[in-house]
Image (spheres, rainbow, N blue to C red):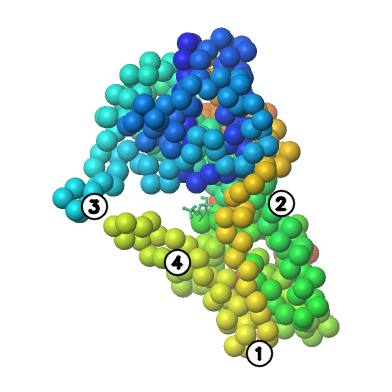
Amino acid sequence: MKRIGILTGGGDAPGLNAVIRAAVRTASNVYDCQTLGIRDGYDGFLDPKNGVIPLDVDAVRGILARGGTILGAANRGNPYARKVIRDGKEITIDVSDEIVRGINEQGLDALLVLGGDGTLHIAHELSLKGVPVIGVPKTIDNDIGGTEITFGFDTALNIATEALDRLQTTAESHHRAMVVELMGRDAGFITLNAGVSGGADVILIPEIPFKFESVMKKIHERAAKGRKFSLLAVSEGAKPEGGAQVFSRQGDEVYVPRLGGIGQRVAEYIERQGFESRVTVLGHVQRGGTPTAFDRWLATRYGAAAVRLAAEGGFDRMVALERGEITSLPLEEALSVPKRVDVNGDAVVTARNIGISFGDE
Ligand code: F6P
């Protein structure tokens, strides 16, 4: 193994830089192997002069605790559906063969792809065209199958929990229902775990459709016992029974659909029932900044393991965590079933046991 590439795709997550650092160090220290950083996801291969940079141990010094990604990421960088302007019109073209050519021109023995569901699906597709890819699971949503946890999740969870702690005190002072809308497109892990850790009274997640009346019932029950405030943790992807998810921007030929607004709907409903309410949308605060110690630790293990897997020739596979140990599995298998909150699992049962409402009863 003489030369490997590394890229970060999709939305960023705290810990990306820790993976890059560990991969570069392992490649250099253990295999005397050069690492190339690919800028802005797969797009870097389309403009190798600017998009491909050498990464040595010096280049990754001091980035362990830094959020974001030193390589840049591209949320709309799908080579199979790249949007370009032709004759003043936006059209979608397939540039995957160009990407494969770019990868081959760099003479890579392996390409480490740090990404979520979308980026890793593309990695698998490219491997079918002969690219030696290794996947590393990244997302604050923690919704990738085949691994117990993705890096970035723990940081987001801690930020969300701190927000709940802070909202609790002001909720209590003003006798209000404080709603916090958290990230989680299709999976409610951030909201569930932060909700439990931050003492939420109501948790609304995409996996459990809710009824507005049940949410209100919980608030009234608390008020009747003298608890005149309530804390509600709401996933951006939560939806009412028989209703749809709420988008702040619908998708069109330029924009991908953007979730947002369910927190506001819930708060408005509560106010219409005569109970004062406020909403906080935490948004990208959950994705930015310093990774927690756990995320740095996990990201470092993933980065080193990905390079070891490359050296063994374990291509078209993803590194994963299973019972606390690093392992790997075929990308296709990992991506076949996205991870969702088990609505009958211990975490949800525990939350119900301690009196948290999911707005479904
Ligand atoms: O998938 C991670 C995530 O943070 C989701 O929770 C959220 O819906 C989405 O990315 C936001 O993406 P963007 O950065 O494109 O707004």
| Mark 3 / mark 2, whichever is N-terminal | 3
Badge 1: residue crowd in 10 Å (few <14, some 14–19, many ≥20)? few
Label 3 with label 2: CB-CB less than 8 Å: no
Q: Amino acid at mark 3?
A: Glu
Q: Residue at x 59, y 50 (%)?
A: 287
Label 4 with label 1: CB-CB less than 8 Å: no
Report which residue position mark 4 lands on.
247
Alpha-carbon distance for marks 1 and 2? 32 Å
Report which residue position mark 1 lands on.
274
Name the side, left or right, on which 68 lies relative to 52. right
Name the side, left or right, on which 197 lies relative to 107. right
Alpha-carbon distance for marks 3 and 1? 48 Å
Residue at the limit of the structure toward the bottom, as seen here? 274
Alpha-carbon distance for marks 4 and 2? 25 Å
Name the side, left or right, on which 101 lies relative to 7. left
Report which residue position mark 2 lands on.
158
Percent x, y of residue 178: 69, 73
Find numbered disc 4 in the image and state the secondary structure of the residue it sits on: strand
Occupied quadrant, residue 332: top left
State which mark lies toward you, 3 or 1: 3
Label 3 with label 1: CB-CB less than 8 Å: no
Nearest the eye: 43 or 335: 43
Residue 351, visible in the rendered structure: no
Q: Amino acid at mark 4?
A: Phe
State which mark lies toward you, 3 or 2: 3
Q: Amino acid at mark 2?
A: Asn
Q: Amino acid at mark 1?
A: Gly
Percent x, y of residue 153: 63, 46
Badge 2: residue crowd in 10 Å (few <14, some 14–19, many ≥20)? some
| Mark 1 / mark 2, whichever is N-terminal | 2
Find numbered disc 2 in the image and state the secondary structure of the residue it sits on: helix
Can you tell which mark lies on residue 90? 3
